[in-house]
Amino acid sequence: MASKASTHVVNFITGNKNKLSEVKAILEPTIEVRSQALDLVEVQGTLEEVTLAKCRAAAEQVGGPVLVEDTCLCFDALNGLPGPYIKWFLNDLGHQGLNNLLAAYEDKGAKAVCTFGFSQGPGHDPKLFQGITQGKIVPARGPTNFGWDPIFEYEGQTYAEMEKSAKNKISHRGRALEALQKWFNEQESS
């Protein structure tokens, strides 16, 4: 049985095989996802500023359409920190260290935020698509092979404990990609 051909193709700029797998699972076959790992300078700033800068730089390097992503984990008690710097906090502190950051606070609430940037290519303004999932920080549970998934709990389960398809429906990444898909569909209709 033949599957429906992809209407769009994007070059997803990532070296993270877990992110690539999630993005492909959510977008394909409607949007074909090709992957390319580029060494992009990570600017400091808000999540939106970081994503816009990455998207522009990737479009210049690729010379065509690109999709980039940046993710935040924002602790409510810490006014949004570690935010876009979660990757570095996790690398240096680990799951237990991230929990320790909240030890003095009753509020364990956190937001998982994902922002995708899409550009048609060099000179085109990037479009941003954002998804947010509200949850809380808990001691690590589940497989520890994908970032901070073991410490982010949503409705009783950590991301790491969830089936991948269930996680993709409610996750920050899934919600951002849903907005991206909607935008692509609107472009087709106009």
Image (cartoon, grey):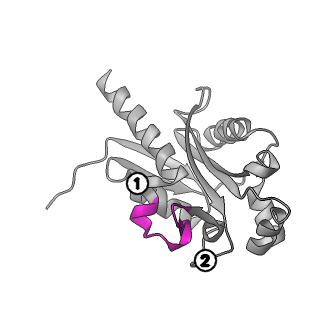
**Is 158 inside the magenta-drawn segment?**
yes
**Is 68 inside the magenta-drawn segment?**
no
Q: Secondary structure at mark 2?
A: loop
Residue drawn at x 39%, y 35% as measured from the top left:
182
Residue drawn at x 52%, y 32% as measured from the top left:
120
Residue drawn at x 76%, y 66% as measured from the top left:
90
User: Distance of mark 2 from mark 1, alpha carbons?
Assistant: 24 Å
Front in this rendered view, residue 77 or 127 = 77
Image mark for residue 156:
none
Residue 188 x %, y %: 32, 29
Give left or right: position of 115 versus 57: left
Graded by Cα atoms within 10 Å as few (under 14), some (14 to 19) or many (20 or more), the crowding at tag 2 reads: some
Front in this rendered view, residue 146 or 36 = 146
**Stretch in magenta:** 154-167
Q: In the picture shown, does residue 148 fall above or below 183?
A: below
User: Toward which corner of the image does residue 150 lie, by quadrant?
Assistant: bottom right
Which residue lies under the disc numbered 1? 26
Image mark for residue 141:
2
Front in this rendered view, residue 77 or 158 = 77
Graded by Cα atoms within 10 Å as few (under 14), some (14 to 19) or many (20 or more), the crowding at tag 1 reads: some
Image quadrant where one finds the C terminus: top left
